[in-house]
Every structure is written in C-alpha cells, then in structure tokens.
Amino acid sequence: MGAARDSRDELPSEARTPNPARVGRADRDREVVEQVICGESISHIGRSHGFASPGASIRLVDRALDAVLPTLSRQQQQRVDLARLDCLLQAWWKRATEGDLEAARVVLATIEERTRALAALEAGRADELGPVGRSGVAGT
C-alpha cells in the first residue's frame, strides 16, 4: 500500500488554481485604470461595470487604482500623465486635422504639454511638473 498522505502536504484548492473572481477582478481593475487614464468620468466607469450609485463607482475606481497602481513613483506618475495626454491627442486629432479650430487649439496645447512633460521625464526633473496627486494629474 502507498504511503499515508498527510493533509498538511496538500495545498488548499485556491492555491492550486486561480480564483475566477480574483482573475475577473484583476482584469476589471486594469480596465478601470485604463478608463481613468483616458479621462472617462467616474460615473461613466461605474455604469460601464454595472454600478449605478456614485458611491459604488467611486469605490470601484479607488479599489482599482489601489490594486493596479498601489504606489507610483514620480516617474511612473509622469508616464501615466503622458498616456493621458496621448489619449487626449487621439480624441481630438481627427477634428483638428479636418479644420476644427477649437480642436486644433486643444491639440497644440496638448502637444506643448506633452513635450514639456516628456522633457522633464527624460531629464529626471519630476518636480518641474508640479504636484501630482493619486489620480496622476498635476494639481489633483
């Protein structure tokens, strides 16, 4: 007969296979953070994930930011800012190139800000961008 197995030798089932709820939550958290980076409103983000109340939407975004971006260095915050500026450029670019003067102003201002942010990032001068809050946006 085989050797007796000690129950302490077995891993709990959750250690052997990923918890689908946790995997789903991790995917959702990454998606929520992407939505935040691209500037979607908290209420829109909440509704897109099935949360109707503002409080639940805020908690959803807070948990996702904590899970995906628990503590960002200043350089990482700047990269988030650059990604946001890229999303902004993408959103306004077509209108600007079709002759919309307001869109062209937004694009030009965004390019100027992105150039300044990129130069500061490359030079390691994070403090020149001003205070960056948890949301990754200067002044927040």
Image (tube, rainbow, N blue to C red):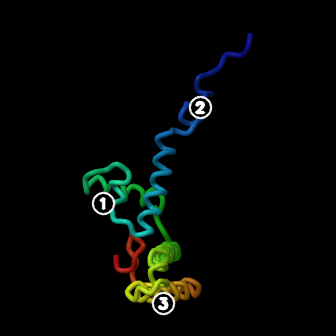
Label number found at residue 11: 2
Say which element carries label 1. Answer: helix
> Residue at position x 49%, y 86% from top?
111
For the image, the number of numbered tags is 3
Quadrant where the C terminus lies?
Answer: bottom left
Q: Earlier in the sequence, mark 1 or mark 3?
A: 1
Mark 2 or 3: in front is 3
Mark 1 or 2: in front is 1
> Residue at position x 49%, y 72% from top?
80
> Residue at position x 58%, y 23% from top?
7
Residue marked by disc 3 = 112
Q: Amino acid at mark 3?
A: Glu
Label number found at residue 43: 1
Query: Label 1 to label 2, Cα distance in Å?
Result: 41 Å
Q: Position of residue 135 (x, y in %)?
A: 39, 70
Q: Position of residue 32 (x, y in %)?
A: 43, 58
